[in-house]
Image: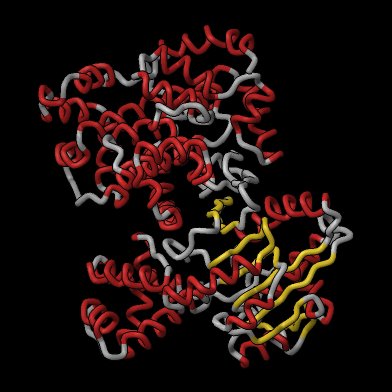
Amino acid sequence: MSSAGTAKAITSESAEDVKDAAYLKIRDVIYRISGIYHAEEKLYLLASRCKRRMSAIGAKTPAEYLDQLTMGGNREAELRLLLNEITIGETYMFRSPPQIEALRNVILPQMVQEKSALGFKRLRLWSAGCSTGEEPYTLAMFLLEESAKLLAGWTFDILATDLNDRSLAAAKEGVYGEYALRSTSELLRKKYFRQHDEKRLQVTEHLKSIVRFDRVNLSDDSKMTFLKGMDLILCCNVLIYFDLASKRKVMQHFYSNLLPGGYLFLGHAESLYQVDDRFQLVHFPGAIGYWKAPDGRSAGGKS
Amino acid sequence: MNPQALEQLRPKIEALETIPTIPTIVLPLASLLQRPLDEVRVEQVVELVSCDGTIAAQCMRMANSPLFGRQKTETVKNAVLALGLKRVEAILLGCCLNQIVPPDKWVFDALIFWRHSLGCALVSSKMARLIGYPDPEKAYLAGLTHDLGILVNNIACTEEFRRCFEKAREQRVALHRSEEEHLGFSHCQSGKILAQTWSFPTDLVDVVQFHHDVPGLTDRPLVCLIHLSDMLCRLRDLGYGYYEAVGVHLAGTAAWATLVKYYPALAKTDLARLTLDIDGAMDEIRTLVDEVFRPQAPAPH
């Protein structure tokens, strides 16, 4: 995250301030409403995000800001602005290596084995809320790299959707600067990008050809019902903006969009606690996935 | 399991009883702490703890760690008071255990082992509190000592254990599986022999012996609790320092099914949040372990 360093610098000057009990309450409010959780040791990050919003609206203390968030006339808009601050800078390629490693080492071998047995060598992935395209292109690079190994002889496609037309246009153009590429190896840059201008790279047509972009509103039942046969859905930091009823509805859709045995991944600090009870929460090294178990099966006991 | 292989090892393990590096204060302190708590005077404990620089430093460092949510303490007495006698006992045991493996016998980094053990102790006591298990300090102690057998394997069969560890890392499988395959027994069985030799209480011996093998253990909730926190730690970068290629639905395990019968609150546990709390504690666990568990050359006798 771009601002982690700055956040630490700010808080080391005012470490006591982070201990303000109001931040714990703000943490709890955010968790209750959005599902984004900050462990106590990470409160300094939350505090630095809050401080930006506090100076923007002129709140002098965390307690005053908490009041704005919970009782202010503008609380819904303010919460959204704070959530934007919290998730800012989270969009870059290969942002979550543990998710990719879980795909590579656990999920893909399992899917390949089970689907090969059925003679069905095809994978469908969906990046729901793809923003400016970093996530679907990451998946595309990952699948292409695996196509020489585990996925030899397989076909795959990636659906990438967002509500925001400007984001989608940027995603389709596929031009990225150093920040978006900070975790992309030199090898992958050479293989899947070409120089666009002095400072930016553009994804190759080959990489683009694997991803299909579309505008989808996750609350649009008619469109959501239509999307079937997914093996994997990634939906990072999108549901945090939904209220509980809408979250539940989207989760119902995701559940039926997925094939039995398919997985849903959320952002690393997001939780579905008390939102959904049909998916099985599965721990992978450093990552949590939500599994649509084929009837009567459990992923448990494989330790 | 291969009982013969384990039996060949038994004399070696039983001989660990007499390892000479146990600090001199340990015996009096241990016997003091074994008395009923209302008979123990804090001053006596403080006096004994103050005699040993390592244990005193460890008590101070733990008492001041944000992981335990304590206020700043500057004296050994305040540290002992803040930690409680049970926790002092666990620290004492940790210090002793840390000294039984000679530095050249560690097959993998001792600090990685202690991060796992301390992580498991913390997660166990946290889970104990979350689900209403009545003795979180017991859970802490059980978490800290559950892998006693790994210490045993480091000492008693170093080269064979090294091969098991290498294989486990290569194949990215659980260490106990690799031990069973290549040694004929796992750290669960070798640990049990030492735990019994050291007269550990029965429930702790059970944890050492069964923490990887819970199906059928319907009457041992503590073992199930440690089984779950051990897995959580291994899945959150507090394992043995290598990638285990697994996906585990914790709520679908036999240990979960047993534990939830005793402590229904477990069913309501917010696992995603607990997991993020473990991640949050990671840096402090590393720092704490690096500071207090760094293997030291044995003191001259």
Counting labels gives 0
Q: Which image quadrant is residue B142 in?
A: top left
Residue A266 in percent (x, y) is at 55, 66
Residue placed most toward the observer, B175 or B107: B175
Q: Which image quadrant is residue A178 in?
A: bottom right
Residue A111 in percent (x, y) is at 74, 54
Residue placed most toward the observer, B60 or B140: B140
Residue placed most toward the observer, B7 or B93: B7
Q: Residue furthest right?
A: A153
Quarter of the image with the C terminus of chain A in it: top right
**Res. A29 in view:** yes
The residue at the point 37 percent across, 88 percent down is: A77
Is A237 rendered above or below residue A96? Answer: below
**Res. B98 in view:** no
Report the side of B250 relative to A26 (left or right). right
Residue placed most toward the observer, B177 or B55: B177
The residue at the point 45 percent across, 71 percent down is: A4
The residue at the point 48 percent across, 23 percent down is: B209
Is B291 rendered above or below residue B183? Answer: below
The residue at the point 59 percent across, 13 percent down is: B6
Report the side of A46 relative to A300 (left or right). left
Report the side of A24 relative to B214 (left or right). left
Is A87 rendered above or below residue A233? Answer: below
